[in-house]
Amino acid sequence: MIKDEKLLERYLSEELKVVNRSLPIKRKTLSELLREEYPHVLTRDGGVHMFRRSELRLAYELLGSELASRLYLPIILEVKTEFKETVMCVNDAVAAKLIAKILGLKYYELPLYIYPKQLSVLRRSIGTLIHYAFTFS
Amino acid sequence: MSQQVIRIVRPTKIELIRLRRRLAIARRLHKVLKDRLVILTQEFISLIKDALSLRKEIHKGLDLCDEKLAKALSVSTLREVEVLATTLYESFQVIVGSRVSAGVRVPLLDIEFSEYSNALTKKPLSLIDAARCYRSIIEKIVKLTEIEYSIYRIGAEVSRVKRRVNALEYILIPRLINTIKFLEMKFEEREREDKIRLKKVKELLLRRAGG
């Protein structure tokens, strides 16, 4: 029985590792990425996550030069597993501002909660700039 | 749903506590996987929609480009078209990379054209129009390649996660619940037996004291 319990716990941690293995090691600012020839960040699994230049330009247009140096990419969308429904949240103020502009939200507060229906809008406009992280309490 | 019960060596309270802990872990794991499945499925569906619309656009665009080319050929010679085709772009670059979408690595393709600065000067407008049309088609084809490969990768991950979610939802969690119920019933029965035994002992002691 104890063996089974440990097996299940190990399976859970392995599954979480699979889910979160592609998180970036170090994030870069939008202005830094725009200066790169091939904008990218390295991920924990040793891979590369590339950004689409057109999406970076869109983010720059929406935020302006001042906020571009404060926006760290990729934007991490925390998937809150403790809620009954699938909900994601953004804690970064600059990232929340960008997302609110894309979603057309006039009023919002931190943390900004995002629902699956809004995801498709985000994916279309800034698909390579967002990343999911599964948090586990 | 599974009606089976997990085989337990000894039906003790400790086992019941362990089973409850396992059930809590299994439920949390189920929630994590289900959330991931929701995100992946959404991505999968939106990619399929994109691929379909892009395919339609490419087919329509090709017809339009052919028409434009025919129009261009009516005002310029075939030789001129060939010269323009070879001298229009200095180079073009297909950037091949990868991105991660909900834990799945999918390809990222981008195409960049570098045009000669004076390539389109003194050329008929219809020819320029046809050239621009074909360029947009190439860009769309590259995008479609990326989307179709992403569909394949995400689809494989959806089926893998779905199997795990189903295994938890229909086998592991129901089995744990059934086993917990079975143990609880067993303990209740034991409690009832103890109560009756105590009553009998009390009666016996009273009878002895009376006698």
Image: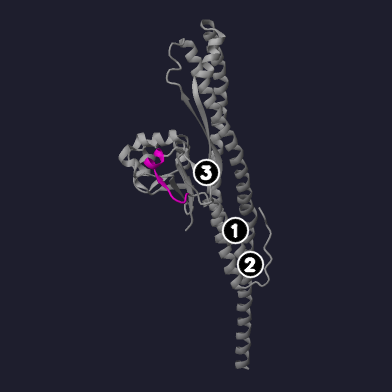
- Residue under mark 3: which chain is it in? B
Identify the residue at the far left of this view. Answer: A66
Crowdedness near tag 2: few (<14), some (14–19) or many (≥20) residues, C-alpha within 10 Å? few
Element under disc 2: helix
Amino acid type, label 1 = Tyr
- Residue under mark 1: which chain is it in? A
Closer-to-camera residue (A117/A19): A19
Asked whether residue B180 is in view, the answer is no
Identify the residue at the far top of this view. Answer: B74
Amino acid type, label 2 = Lys
Measure the alpha-carbon separation of dots 1 and 2. Answer: 12 Å
Closer-to-camera residue (A116/B122): B122
Closer-to-camera residue (A73/B123): B123
Q: Which residue is mark 3?
A: B100
Residue A96 image position (x, y, % from top left):
37, 43
| Callouts 2 and 3 close, C-beta under 8 Å | no
Q: Residue at 56% of width from left, 40% of height from top?
A: B106
Q: Assess whether residue B46 is covered by the magenta stretch.
A: no
Which badge, 1 or 2, comes first in the chain's sequence?
2
Q: Which residue is mark 2?
A: A3
Q: Nearer the viewer, mark 3 or mark 1?
A: 3
Measure the alpha-carbon separation of dots 2 and 3. Answer: 34 Å
Residue B32 image position (x, y, % from top left):
53, 52
Closer-to-camera residue (B24/B32): B32
- When asked about the image quadrant of residue B189, the answer is bottom right
Q: Which residues are magenta?
A: A24-35
